[in-house]
Image (cartoon, grey):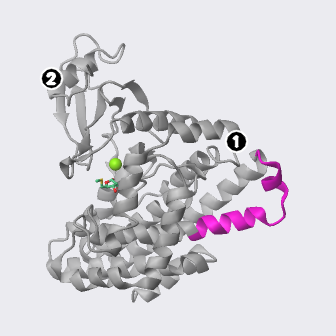
Amino acid sequence: MSAYHPLNEEEAIRIARSIEGFFPQEAELRSREIGDGNLNLVFHIADSVGGKSLIMKQALPYAKVVGESWPLTLDRARIESEKLILEAKLAPGLVPTVYKYDAELALTVMEDLSDHVIMRQGLINGTRYPKFADDISTFMARTLFYTSDLGMNQQDKKNQVKSFINPDLCKITEDLIFDDPYTVSSNNSFDPAIADAADALTKDSALHLEVAILREKFLTNAQALLHGDLHTGSIFVTPESTKVIDPEFAYYGPIGFDIGAVIANLLLDYAGQEHWMSDEAMREDFRQYLITSIIEIWNQFESKFRTLWNEQGVDRLANSAAGYQDYYMKRLLQDAVGFAGCKMVRRVVGLAHVADIDRIPDDATREKAQRLALAIGTSLIRGNRQTQTIEQAIDTALTAAGK
Ligand code: SR1
Ligand code: MG
């Protein structure tokens, strides 16, 4: 019989005590369930005497945001802990340390990052993160290059693909990002004020063609081991530090999907700033900071990925075929732009939204932000295959959205 059951706070404390060498014997442990995500239980366990603390994340056998009617594999806890351990090797300092993984309880015990803030909240508060573009571009360049056919033994890669097959979590993305927003689905959720815009998404055949092409890439293009859900709620930050968390959606997919997630979430915050930054000059200045960050993230990612390829590429033909690297990098940019658009659209009309926009209290301002996000997102989707530079892609999308 499986020992799996959702933990209560006392059990979480007992497990924390059993982690050898972490808490001293005299520790007075307190536990709080702090999970505010869509899927899991998260316990914060701290010693009120010595001050040490850790995080325990336990997968539930269903999607918490929906309930038991949406079963989900517990194997995602294994995927998450293995991916975190791999990321720590490939991108040291940019992920929390894993202290323990318990397969039976689907439990990962890891470093507490309470001295950081969730980036989504930081951006909502108008905070700037000067190291972010450098850190996240390093994280993506290294985790994606070293798990791709360009940067690792290609036979080992096939085995790695096997151990990161993640059908339940991929299905969430396939439905919520690449299907539901473009049809009438019971998963969708949007304010009645934008019903016309949501309806238009279901009838736009040019848009459907682009989404179908991007969906095919998500379904079939096993380019590298992705984080798979790299939004600003999966990133802890301070002005000096970046830590990427929550890789339970990891699987072998198209590299542009991770890059697009970061771009999309900065643009969603751009739209939400309609409310959060009430002074117009300050708002436009902060928006410019977000756009500059996106451009820096792509440019630094591209340069770091190319350097890794030039110095450590393992594929003879990919290394030597004239024009191949440029062709490959252009495709990554175009994919990133298209995926960014899809990720924006789903956060306005689909099942799971973002606080940057959803928490805007005034109906008219929220509607304005939602329409702005939809206009930017759909323009990125429409233009993805024509993209030549990141500057041009963002400029075209903002112009189309009236900015
Ligand atoms: C049912 S899960 C909804 C969303 O939460 C996660 O963070 C993913 O983005 C997923 O699509
Ligand atoms: Mg998550």
Which residue range is magenta in the image?
Answer: 314-334
- Look at the picture and state if 201 lies above or below 347: below
Residue 186 horizontal/vertical position (percent): 22, 66
Check the picture and name the quadrant holding the N terminus: top left
Q: Identify which residue, 301 or 334, lies in the foreground.
A: 334
- Quarter of the image for residue 158 reads top right
Pinpoint residue 159: horizontal percent, then vertical percent.
Answer: 60, 36
* Residue at disc 1, CB closer than 8 Å to ligand 1: no
What is the number of the mark on residue 154?
1
Q: Magenta segment, principal secondary structure?
A: helix
Type of amino acid under label 2? Glu
Q: Residues within 10 Å of mark 2 (few under 14, many from 20)?
A: few
Q: Which mark is on residue 10?
A: 2
**Of the residues shown, which amino acid type is indicated by label 1?**
Gln
Which image quadrant shows ligand 1?
bottom left
For label 1, the crowd category at 10 Å Cα-Cα, with few meaning under 14, some 14 to 19 and many 20 or more, is: some
Q: CA distance from mark 2 to mark 1?
A: 46 Å
Dot 2 falls on a residue whose secondary structure is helix
Tally of numbered discs: 2
Residue 315 lies in magenta, yes or no? yes
